[in-house]
Image (tube, rainbow, N blue to C red):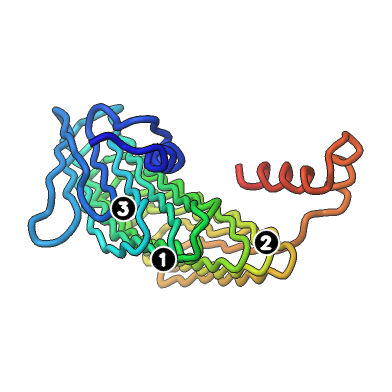
């Protein structure tokens, strides 16, 4: 069945696609699997005991990608989906996820997803996840993603997560366990406005010798929105960890940043940073002297901050 214009717009926003992709993909629309396809090295299987899919990536797979977007274009849908990723030894792949909700009605639309990643020795993954909401209905657009990451030795994972528009409430949880010489890098971009609420929790356990993580969140809160950022890094071996939250606060918004580090090994090297502030007046003035209005100058600064 062809996608309608709203569904195509959501697909473009969360996955950068203008049509159903080629190669390995799974597309879920309005609470049901719309379509899926496997490739020679990437197998996608529908779960039989609960909603969701299993993705198996063969050892040694290089420079391949898989898309698994979720779209809700009908009001009143609430779903919980389980997706498990099994990445074989030495594989190097890109995984593009994301969820888009269009709500033009009065009932709440909600998508909750639990993604579990199992990286074998030497595997490398780039994971991109975008969340987007649209529609002029009074019903809430709610997304609650949970990500679990289990990394074998010498594996590497880079996560890029973004929520820039239209999500009324979100509770984002990421937990990871790293073996020897594994590395996890996380970049989060988040903007809230209106009366939206967003909570982000990162918890990384550096269990293996030489493991490391770098967690960075950049956030903007506008209007009467609220954000809570919690980041925990546990250094359980000789390791290195860094967590950072930079936020811009505007209007009547509220942001709480709560970084936490704990070490149980004498050679654990951990750092945490948090900074919350307003847009500097001199930045606005500089752009306004170039002909921008105050609103246009604010948008330029925010866009640059969230890049």
Describe residue 69's horizontal placement relative to residue 306 as left or right. left
Describe residue 202's horizontal placement relative to residue 45 as left or right. right
Describe residue 216's horizontal placement relative to residue 19 as left or right. right
Q: Distance from label 2 to label 3 (Cα)?
A: 41 Å
Q: Distance from label 3 to label 1 (Cα)?
A: 17 Å
From the viewer's side, name the closer residue of 31 and 264: 31
Q: Residue at x 18, y 58 (%)?
A: 51
Task: Look at the image and tell me whether residue 240 can be seen.
Answer: yes
Name the secondary structure under disc 3: loop
Residue highlighted by disc 2: 222
Residue highlighted by disc 1: 203
* Residue 185 spot, x, y in % from top left: 45, 49
* Residue 121 spot, x, y in % from top left: 23, 44
From the viewer's side, name the closer residue of 268 and 202: 202
Q: Residue at x 66, y 69 (%)?
A: 224
Q: Distance from label 1 to label 2 (Cα)?
A: 26 Å
Packing grade of label 3 (10 A; few <14, some 14-19, many >=20) is: many
Packing grade of label 2 (10 A; few <14, some 14-19, many >=20) is: some
């Amino acid at each position: 069945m062809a996608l309608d214009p709203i569904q195509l717009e959501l697909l473009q926003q969360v996955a950068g696609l203008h049509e159903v992709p080629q190669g390995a993909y799974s597309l879920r629309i309005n609470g049901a699997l719309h379509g899926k396809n496997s490739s020679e090295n990437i197998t996608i299987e529908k779960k039989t005991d609960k909603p969701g899919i299993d993705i198996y990536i063969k050892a040694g797979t290089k420079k391949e990608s898989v898309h698994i977007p979720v779209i809700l274009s009908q009001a009143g849908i609430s779903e919980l989906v389980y997706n498990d990723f099994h990445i074989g030894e030495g594989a190097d792949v890109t995984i593009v996820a994301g969820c888009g909700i269009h709500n033009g009605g009065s009932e709440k639309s909600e998508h909750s997803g639990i993604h579990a990643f199992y990286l074998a020795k030497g595997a490398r993954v780039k994971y991109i996840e975008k969340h987007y909401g649209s529609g002029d209905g009074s019903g809430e657009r709610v997304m609650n993603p949970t990500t679990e990451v289990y990394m074998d030795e010498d594996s590497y994972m880079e996560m890029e997560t973004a929520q820039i528009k239209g999500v009324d409430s979100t509770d984002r949880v990421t937990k990871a366990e790293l073996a020897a010489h594994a590395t996890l890098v996380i970049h989060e971009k988040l903007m809230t406005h209106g009366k939206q609420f967003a909570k982000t929790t990162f918890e990384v356990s550096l269990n293996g010798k030489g493991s490391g993580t770098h967690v960075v969140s950049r956030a903007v809160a506008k209007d009467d929105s609220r954000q809570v950022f919690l980041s925990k890094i546990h250094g359980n071996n000789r390791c290195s960890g860094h967590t950072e939250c930079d936020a811009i606060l505007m209007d009547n918004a509220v942001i709480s940043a709560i970084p936490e580090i704990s070490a149980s090994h004498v050679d654990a090297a951990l750092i945490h940073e948090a900074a919350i502030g307003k847009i500097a007046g001199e930045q606005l003035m500089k752009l306004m002297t170039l002909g921008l209005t105050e609103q246009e100058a604010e948008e330029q600064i925010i866009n640059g901050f969230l890049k």
